[in-house]
């Protein structure tokens, strides 16, 4: 009987000692492992923010409710020129569109030293992109309010809302601009006068 009691006391004591030994053997993470975990967390946070931003801009494009504010104009040969986003824009609200180009310090008949045209979207298409890494895209024809040729536009939009706009003017060539898209309520554009 004493052997059985000693046997149980031995196992009881071992049970008390084992958890202490396991705590004592717990490994502390190295700085390299901590940096790796932090890097992974930051990457996941950026991806989450990028997805949220992508959904916001996709909704603006789907609903035909955005303003593209250009900050760069691209000329022949890929040369770029900074332009003012307050007077260089493409505004789309439902099926109405305003397209304006202008240059700071230059006065013209439209008041902004360039061109202001209004019209309507025709054959507007939204392409959501198959993956998060693919840009959002739209394409449409523009029917000018006063008549005339119908320019064709395409715009690709990154997840952060930065976009590239191509306007094909038929035989007159192509205009390429880059800038940010925003909701019309958050835009800071100044519309000049049109001829009609």
Image (tube, grey):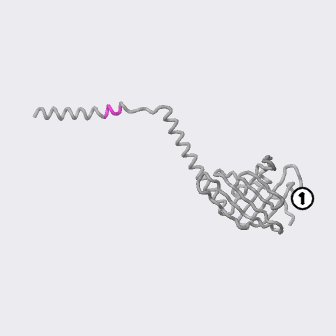
Query: Is 139 left, or right, of 80 in this rendering?
Result: left
In the foreground, 140 or 9 = 140
Image coordinates of residue 149 in percent, x first then y, are 82, 66
Image coordinates of residue 114 in percent, x first then y, are 85, 56
Occupied quadrant, residue 59: bottom right
Image coordinates of residue 174 in percent, x first then y, are 79, 56
In the foreground, 178 or 16 = 178
Q: Residue at x 66, y 59 (%)?
A: 60
Which residue lies most toward the left here? 1
Query: Is 122 left, or right, of 48 in this rendering?
Result: right
The quarter of the image holding the N terminus is top left
Which range of residues does the magenta coloring cover?
19-23
Density class for disc 1 (Cα within 10 Å; few <14, some 14-19, many ≥20) is few
The quarter of the image holding the C terminus is bottom right
Query: Is 156 left, or right, of 1 in this rendering?
Result: right
Give the number of callouts: 1
Q: Residue at x 87, y 49 (%)?
A: 105
* Magenta span contains residue 29: no
Q: Which residue corresponds to mark 1?
A: 109
In the image, residue 80 sits, relative to residue 153, either above or below, namely: above
Image coordinates of residue 99 in percent, x first then y, are 79, 60
In the image, residue 36 sits, relative to residue 182, either above or below, namely: above
**Secondary structure at numbered mark 1:** loop
Occupied quadrant, residue 19: top left
Give the prevailing secondary structure in the magenta stretch: helix
* Magenta span contains residue 20: yes
């Amino acid at each position: 009987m004493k052997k059985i009691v000693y046997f149980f006391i031995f196992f009881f004591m071992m049970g008390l000692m084992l958890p202490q030994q396991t705590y004592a053997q717990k490994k502390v993470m190295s700085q390299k492992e901590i940096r790796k975990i932090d890097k992974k967390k930051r990457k996941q946070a950026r991806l989450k923010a990028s997805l949220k931003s992508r959904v916001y801009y996709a909704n603006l494009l789907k609903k035909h409710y955005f303003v593209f504010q250009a900050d760069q104009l691209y000329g022949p040969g890929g040369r770029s020129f900074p332009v003012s986003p307050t007077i260089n824009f493409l505004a789309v609200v439902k099926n109405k569109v305003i397209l304006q180009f202008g240059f700071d310090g230059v006065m013209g008949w439209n008041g902004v030293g360039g061109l202001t045209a209004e019209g309507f979207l025709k054959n507007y298409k939204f392409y959501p992109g198959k993956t998060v890494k693919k840009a959002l895209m739209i394409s449409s024809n523009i029917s000018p309010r006063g008549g005339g040729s119908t320019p064709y536009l395409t715009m690709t939009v990154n997840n952060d809302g930065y976009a590239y706009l191509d306007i094909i003017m038929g035989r007159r060539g192509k205009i390429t601009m880059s800038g940010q898209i925003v909701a019309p309520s958050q835009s800071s554009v100044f519309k000049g006068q049109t001829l009609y």
